[in-house]
Amino acid sequence: MNAYIARRVLATIPVLFGVSLLVFLMLELVPGDPAQLMLSEFQTNPEQIARLRSQLHLDDPLPVQFGRFVWDAMHGDLGTSIRTRRPVLQEIQDNFPSTIELAVAGLVVAAIMGVGFGIAAAANQGTWLELGSMTVALIGISMPSFWLGLLLIFSLSLRVPVFPATGGGDLQHLILPAITLGLGAAAILARLTRSSMLEILRQEYVTTARAKGLAEWAVILRHALKNALIPVVTIFGLQFGQLLAGTVVVETVFARPGLGRLIIDGILNKDFPMVQGVVLVIAACYVVVNLLVDLVYAVLDPRIRYT
């Protein structure tokens, strides 16, 4: 088991290196002078642009710049925001809890609805319950999150004022964004859970469990569900990374604080250090989540740790 964990951890190092390289090249691939673009909204002179280039070390060779970027990032230095003049890491720390709160809430919605609908559809194949579950899943996977968010705001905030439309800070402000973020992932999990459960329920050991007289709920939850969840866990972990990225849209629609708003504000204000830092943090979170998913595999199926 320890060797399996060590291999998986070592495998994340080249991934993180590649992510760091792509994030670094974001600044270099922008057409024009990055320093001039950052100061384009201000009255500047060549001396001020040269000073900013010097602060960002843009005159150094690219390998030197990349080495400094990686070294600083490893020590928690992601640069200074051009707009707020505060360290990028401090801005991320101030907004990260709100994004994690929204992503986890969306994941809870996706898990409850997706796995629940998938099990219900598989256990009631050919009935109206299966049709209804898969219809909801089809709607969820087809509807863009920004459109769903606007519909929820219109119906449950403006027409029927049950939940607040914008802002953050308490559970009421979290419910609509969590549903908006989690419904698409729930649809994917529901369809995958249904197909996986149907395959497991046809296995001989499930037939044997039924022949022993076990209740249907015991057969499903105690014998079939654990094996059926192995492919679901794969998508579950990947969906969490996608939910982190999806907060950009949802936080904008519901005017919530978070990393998504930082990225949008950074792009609009040409604050490249901010955009680089936030993208790097989100990408690192994605890699860590995938690592945790690999470790969960070894718990669900001990055979995996030997492969």
Image: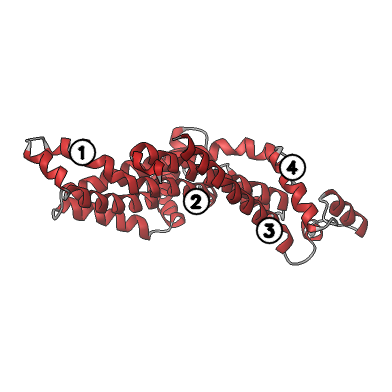
Spatial CA span between label 3 and label 2 = 20 Å
Q: Position of residue 294 (x, y in %)?
A: 44, 43
Q: CA distance from mark 3 to mark 4?
A: 17 Å
Q: Nearer the viewer, mark 1 or mark 4?
A: 1
Tell me what residue is drawn at x 25 percent, y 54 percent. Answer: 195
Q: Residues within 10 Å of mark 3 (few under 14, many from 20)?
A: few
Mark 3 = which residue?
26
Q: CA distance from mark 1 to mark 3?
A: 49 Å
Q: Quadrant of the N terminus?
A: top left
Q: Earlier in the sequence, mark 3 or mark 4?
A: 3
**Residue identified by numbered label 1:** 223
- Sequence-wise, the earlier of marks 4 and 2 is 4
- For marks 2 and 1, give the one nearer the viewer: 1
For marks 1 and 4, the one nearer the N-term is 4
For badge 4, the amino acid type reads Asp
Q: Does the CB distance between marks 2 and 1 fall below 8 Å?
A: no
Q: Amino acid at mark 1?
A: His
Give how far across and how far down residue 12 sits, in percent: 56, 46
Q: Are marks 4 and 2 in contact (CB under 8 Å)?
A: no
